[in-house]
């Protein structure tokens, strides 16, 4: 018997904040599915609506390094910095400049740092 595999339609799509790399806009979409507690996260190229993680979505909000490696696979060249707090490699596109240092948005940024 054939197993039909097709991309299910998510119940809810939550778009996260857009960011720019190489002058192009990207976004992480969080997908909430019917009848399961699972969520998945896709990296989307906003200018073309192309889902860059079509083969394999993330099951957690991707780290900056995961986002960067997907962007590199698709020929983009994201600039990276190091988070001043946790020393992780972070995307400059989403990082926050505080005085002379960078703080990662997904790892350490807190609105109180504003
Ligand atoms: Zn950090």
Image (tube, helix red, strand yellow):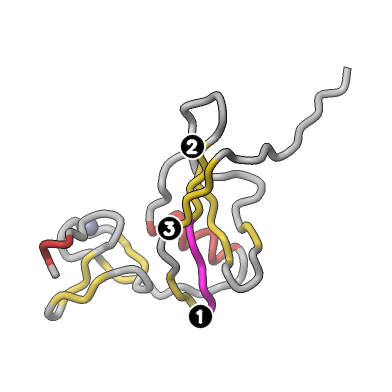
Q: Residue at x 50, y 60 (%)?
A: 69
* Sequence-first tag of 1 and 2: 1
- Closer-to-camera residue (111/57): 111
* Sequence-first tag of 3 and 1: 3
Query: In terms of secondary structure, where does tag 3 sit?
Result: loop
Categorize mark 1 by other alpha carbons within 10 Å: few (<14), some (14-19), many (20+).
few
Residue behind mark 2: 39
Decide whether residue 25 is among the magenta residues: yes
Ligand 1, by image quadrant, is: bottom left
Left or right, 7 with reference to 64: right
Q: Which residues are magenta?
A: 22-28
Q: Is mark 3 within 8 Å of ligand 1?
A: no
Query: In terms of secondary structure, where does tag 2 sit?
Result: strand
Location of residue 59 in the rendering, given as x and y in whole percent from the top left corner: 48, 39
Q: Where, quadrant-wise, is the C terminus in this rendering?
A: bottom left
In whole angstroms, how far apart are the C-alphas of marks 3 and 2? 14 Å
Q: Residue at x 42, y 50 (%)?
A: 62
- Closer-to-camera residue (36/71): 36
Say whether marks 3 and 1 touch (CB < 8 Å): no
Residue behind mark 1: 22
- In the drawing, what numbered circle is on residue 89? none
Answer above or below: position of 112 versus 33: below
Q: Residue at x 44, y 67 (%)?
A: 18
Q: Residue at x 88, y 17 (%)?
A: 1
Say whether marks 3 and 2 touch (CB < 8 Å): no
- In the drawing, what numbered circle is on residue 16? 3
């Amino acid at each position: 018997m054939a197993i039909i595999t097709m991309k299910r339609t998510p119940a809810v799509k939550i778009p996260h904040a857009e960011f720019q790399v190489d002058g192009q806009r990207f976004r992480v979409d969080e997908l909430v599915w019917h009848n399961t507690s699972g969520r998945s996260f896709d990296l989307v190229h906003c200018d073309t609506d192309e889902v860059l993680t079509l083969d394999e979505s993330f099951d957690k909000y991707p780290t900056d390094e995961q986002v960067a490696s997907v962007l590199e696979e698709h020929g983009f060249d994201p600039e990276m910095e190091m988070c001043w707090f946790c020393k992780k490699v972070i995307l400059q596109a989403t990082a926050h400049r505080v005085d002379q240092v960078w703080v990662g948005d997904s790892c350490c940024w807190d609105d109180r740092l504003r």
